[in-house]
């Protein structure tokens, strides 16, 4: 199996897909497929199913992320029907970050979403997220796993060695865009390990985070331990593409 690069798209918070199309067009030179978040970090965005359909319309492969936080069972079934009508057949199911407004619904769990999707259609591919800790047995029933974003290759390799699974696993890599971004991540993800040296470097060099992420992608590929990378370039997708296009080619 080839090493896959799954690039995450920044979905729009307004009814305009221009920026989405630009991201797809730029990153399609290196990406095997695209992940579209679902109201990520608790903000309302254009439907991940609609954006995944846009990816498909531009000749790419889309993975629509759906969270259990924002939908009840009926709403989830609506999303599955909409996706089927649009030809979207790959999903990543997640719990969902704390919402900035409104309340979290408790009708669904990631586990029940996987079960419901399996009943809806045997042809859909469903994935789950895995933290850098023990892996619940039910997550092994997913078609693929996205390992939590980390900045330590050693920690990712240790997790992979101690959690053998028979499905593709994609290691999470994120571009640290700025010192402010580092503080935001630390507040949102308490157990994330941010290297002090990297935080200091991005404070004075705007390209330090891009270079570190690209180096990590290549190191993960060369390790042979993962099937690919889930890359989150944030707003730096042009810089990431220009550096990885030659290295991955």
Image (spheres, rainbow, N blue to C red):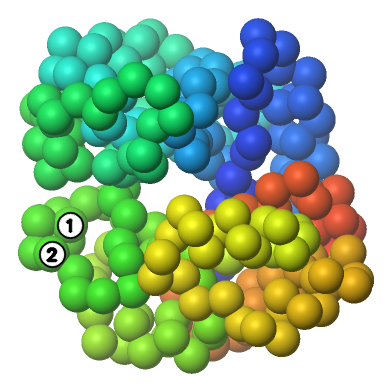
Neighbor class of circle 2 (other Cα within 10 Å; few <14, some 14-19, many 20+) is few
Neighbor class of circle 1 (other Cα within 10 Å; few <14, some 14-19, many 20+) is some
Q: Image quadrant of residue 94?
A: top left
Question: Residue, x 77% and y 26% (percent of image)?
Answer: 19
Residue annotated with mark 2: 136
**Residue 47 as seen in the image, left or right of residue 137:** right
**Visible residue check, residue 84:** no
Tag 2 secondary structure: loop
The C terminus, quarter of image = bottom right
Residue annotated with mark 1: 139
Question: Residue, x 49% and y 39% (percent of image)?
Answer: 41
**Residue 231 as seen in the image, left or right of residue 165:** right
Asked if marks 2 and 1 touch (Cβ < 8 Å), the reply is yes
**Visible residue check, residue 135:** yes
**Residue 232 as seen in the image, left or right of residue 74:** right
Question: Residue, x 81% and y 78% (percent of image)?
Answer: 201
Q: Position of residue 247 (x, y in %)?
A: 80, 72
Question: Residue, x 80% and y 51% (percent of image)?
Answer: 236
* Nearest to the observer: residue 41 or residue 244: 41
Q: Position of residue 122 (x, y in %)?
A: 17, 32
Tag 1 secondary structure: helix
Can you tell which mark lies on residue 20?
none
User: Whole-Å distance between the Cαs marked 2 and 1?
Assistant: 6 Å
């Amino acid at each position: 199996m080839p090493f896959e690069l799954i690039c995450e798209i920044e979905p729009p918070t307004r009814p305009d897909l221009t920026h989405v199309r630009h991201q797809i067009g730029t990153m399609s030179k290196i990406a095997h497929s695209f992940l579209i978040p679902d109201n990520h970090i608790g903000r309302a965005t254009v439907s991940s199913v609609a954006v995944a359909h846009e990816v498909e319309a531009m000749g790419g492969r889309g993975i629509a992320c759906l969270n259990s936080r924002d939908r009840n069972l009926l709403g989830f079934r609506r999303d599955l029907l909409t996706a089927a009508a649009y030809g979207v057949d790959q999903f990543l199911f997640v719990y969902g970050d704390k919402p900035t407004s409104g309340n979290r619904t408790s009708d669904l769990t990631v586990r029940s979403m996987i079960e419901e999707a399996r009943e809806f259609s045997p042809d859909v591919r469903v994935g789950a997220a895995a933290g850098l800790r023990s892996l619940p047995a039910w997550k092994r029933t997913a078609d693929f796993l996205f390992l939590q974003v980390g900045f330590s290759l050693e920690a990712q390799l240790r997790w992979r060695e101690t959690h053998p699974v028979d499905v593709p696993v994609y290691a999470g890599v994120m571009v640290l865009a700025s010192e402010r971004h580092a503080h935001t991540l630390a507040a949102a993800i308490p157990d994330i390990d941010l290297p002090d040296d990297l935080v200091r470097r991005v404070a004075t060099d705007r390209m330090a985070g891009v270079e570190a992420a690209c180096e990590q992608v290549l190191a993960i590929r060369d390790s042979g331990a993962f099937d690919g990378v889930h890359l989150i370039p944030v707003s730096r997708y042009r810089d990431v593409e220009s550096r990885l296009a030659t290295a991955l080619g």
